[in-house]
Amino acid sequence: MSAQLTLFESLPGEPDGLRYAAEFVSPAVEQKIISEIRTLPLQPFQFGQFEGKRRVVSFGFRYDYDLRLLQRAEPMPGWLAETVEKVETFGGPSTKIRQVLCTEYDVGVGIGWHRDKPHFDRVFGLSLGSACKFRFRRPAGKSWERFTLDAEPRSLYMMSGPSRQIWEHSIPPVEAPRYSITFRTMIDEPDLGASV
């Protein structure tokens, strides 16, 4: 099932806790953010001994897959401040973004099924450059219940509750270059010595 969500509309099969806002940023802001991301020291995503094709950089905190630890990263850059503030407003009064991940997807690059690490609470994603299919699945007996969100350029999604904790998500290989910024809140103040 493919669906375009509006901020207050609920559609059949939509994971509980998923919210979507189209045109969250303007085309001019989108281009400015993409230009800034291109100047970052992006590195191939490292998952233990494996190297992903997407390129990333973290701010605030980053997860080290070799050590299985959350570690401090560079502070959030000033050019992100206005967008972070807007995301926090979207999330509501208690929302405090503590971690940001900037990702570059080249043509043919996606991301496999996963849930974000348990250190993180709500997850927001800003889609830039091109659209993508943002897929969800959860076990349903011997098969899977599935839902697909068409994440348009300049849109923002938020995952909380079951959409964040129960459903897995993935992105199939993209057909055009795409960038995303993932904004995360924390469950608690991170214990940087604890592994998960």
Image: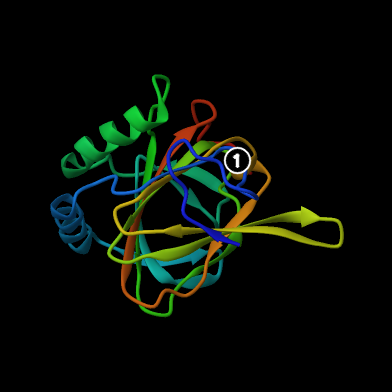
Q: Position of residue 170 (x, y in %)?
A: 55, 62
Q: Nearer the viewer, residue 119 or 143?
A: 143
The C terminus sits in image quarter: top right
Which residue is tagged 1?
Answer: 118
Identify the residue shown where x is 39% and y is 34%: 98
Q: Would you place residue 129 above or below residue 79 in this image?
A: below
Horizontal side, residue 1 vs residue 144: left or right: left
Q: Nearer the viewer, residue 67 or 161?
A: 161
Q: Would you place residue 82 above or below residue 50 in this image?
A: above
**Which SS class for mark 1?**
loop
Q: Position of residue 67 (x, y in %)?
A: 55, 52
Q: Number of labelled discs?
A: 1
Extreme residue toward the right, this view: 142
Horizontal side, residue 30 vs residue 108: left or right: left
The scheme the figure's colours follow is rainbow
The N terminus sits in image quarter: bottom right
Extreme residue toward the top, this view: 93
Q: Position of residue 193 (x, y in %)?
A: 54, 36
Q: Would you place residue 124 above or below residue 146 in this image?
A: above
Mark 1: few, some, or many residues within 10 Å (few <14, many ≥20)? few
Quadrant location of residue 168? bottom right
Identify the residue shown where x is 61% and y is 35%: 161
Q: Position of residue 42 (x, y in %)?
A: 30, 63
